[in-house]
Amino acid sequence: MTVFRGAAALLAAALLPLSLAPLAAQDTTPPLEGVRVGIEYRPGFRPSVVVLPGRGLDSVRAIVARDLDYSDRFDVIALGQGDTAATAANLGGRTVNYALFRTLGAEYAVEVVADGQLTLVRLHDVTTGAIRREQRYPLPAPFDAGFRLAVHRASDELVRWITGTPGAAASQLLFVSDRRLFRVDSDGAGLTQVSAPGEEVLSPAWSPDGSRLVYTRFGAGAGPLVLFSPATGQRQVVAGTGTGLNITPAFSPDGRLLAFARSDESGTDIFTVDVAQNCCLQRLTVGRYSDNLSPTFAPDGRRLAFVSTRAGQPQVYGMASDGTDQDLLAPFDYGATGSSNAPEWSPDGASVVFHRDVNRAPQVFVLDVASRKVRQLTSSGRNEDPTWAPDGRHIAFVSDRSGRRQLWVIDLVSGRVRQLTFAGATRLPAWSRRLTGASPGTH
């Protein structure tokens, strides 16, 4: 298989052994000279929430408490299972000791109890001493494959009840480790291998509704794109990708088109294919001694960001969805910063995240599309391959700050950074939009 220029570098980077140097676990390193670090964390109001103890359903309460914590919207007050004086035992006229929780600083209390075949989730407003919302959920059994995702959906509703905006717990991430594809829940649990036994993969991506995945499969002198349905287990090679190396796929917002880069004897360029009809290959770029790859659609589907080497080092460009109106999207400092790669458009369309070399180490940056201003988000260790959470305020990325390349998550509002994975060595994460599935519950 012949691989050219930028695609060759990407492939080599994906397969090389990973650094094991121990590094700091937080972004406390001073910014490098000549680099503008412009991110501003403005901590907003964070109400205090407590998850009430009770009999049974401990696994549900534990997941909900962790989801609320990881939303970075609340101060979660920890209670031991012995703190039963805070609640009364009867479901129908259940009484919460609001005065007690007010002394603990709680503004909201979450109650999770069994109600026949359903699970009742109830939100108490501790300040006013009243029930604010409640909903009954038909949760699967704890050993069921859909159990965790169903609880995450309930957690997202709790976030919406308090803040008006749903959380992002009911989402998952894809990533590559040891050339295999894995899926993990947003809280780092539920790790599952997605690729078939013996498959070597690269470049995973989600469809907008989360019903399908796409990735590059290596083998037989080519790298086709493969569509995979987790629900049915069906795998299908995407039309027009049976030759050359086809990488960095991205779905259009309506899920109809798939944009990707193909590397063959003519160079590396961006194409689209209609995956709804499995036909209609269209070329968007013509390299002419440069490489073009890593397309990402804006949420309205009208434009794409992508990487091109037309100015020398790879940088982030933009173009209309039909390939016209191509121009530099992310400005850069000659001499202070280097290559820019792996762009991804934010869910609200206002920003594009990517990684850029700073003194030979990749760091995560965010571009404000309207102003074209660039902000640096990381400085500790090597940080790359960023991907947006569906809430638009969290970004997952690969970092070696803990010694080995793992997935980390940063909250853009509070600046909190947490490690998501702890085993193996990860690359190329892709965060899903919210996975809705069946109706989350009944009132």
Image (cartoon, rainbow, N blue to C red):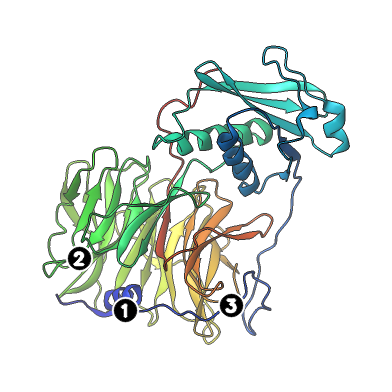
Spatial CA span between label 2 and label 3? 33 Å
> Of the residues under marks 2 and 3, which one precedes in the sequence?
3
Q: Which residue is tagged 2?
A: 218
Using the image as rendered, state which of residue 86 and residue 177 is in the foreground. 86
Q: What element carries label 3?
A: loop
Position of the N terminus, as image quadrant, is bottom left
Q: Is mark 2 on a helix, strand or loop?
A: loop
Q: Which residue is tagged 3?
A: 23
Check disc 3: other Cα within 10 Å, few if <14, some if 14-19, many if 20+.
Answer: some
Q: Which residue is tagged 1?
A: 9
Residue 325 visible (yes or no): no
Q: Residue at x 63, y 36 (%)?
A: 159
> Of the residues under marks 2 and 1, which one precedes in the sequence?
1
Check disc 2: other Cα within 10 Å, few if <14, some if 14-19, many if 20+.
Answer: some
Position of the C terminus, as image quadrant, is top right
Q: Do the residues labelled 2 and 1 touch (CB within 8 Å)?
A: no
Q: Residue at x 49, y 74 (%)?
A: 356
Describe residue 414's horizontal placement relative to residue 248 as left or right. Answer: right
Spatial CA span between label 2 and label 1? 16 Å
Q: Of the numbered discs in the image, which one, if any, rests on residue 414?
A: none
Q: Which residue is drawn at 60% across and 35% down?
A: 58
Depicted 84 relative to depicted 358: above or below: above
Using the image as rendered, state which of residue 54 and residue 301 is in the foreground. 54
Residue 312 % position (x, y): 37, 83
Describe residue 146's horizontal placement relative to residue 397 as left or right. Answer: left
Q: Quadrant of residue 61?
A: top right
Dot in front, 1 or 3: 3
Depicted 32 relative to depicted 43: above or below: below
Q: Residue at x 37, y 39 (%)?
A: 209
Three-letter code for the amino acid on which mark 1 is drawn: Ala
Dot in front, 2 or 3: 3
Three-letter code for the amino acid on which mark 3 is drawn: Leu
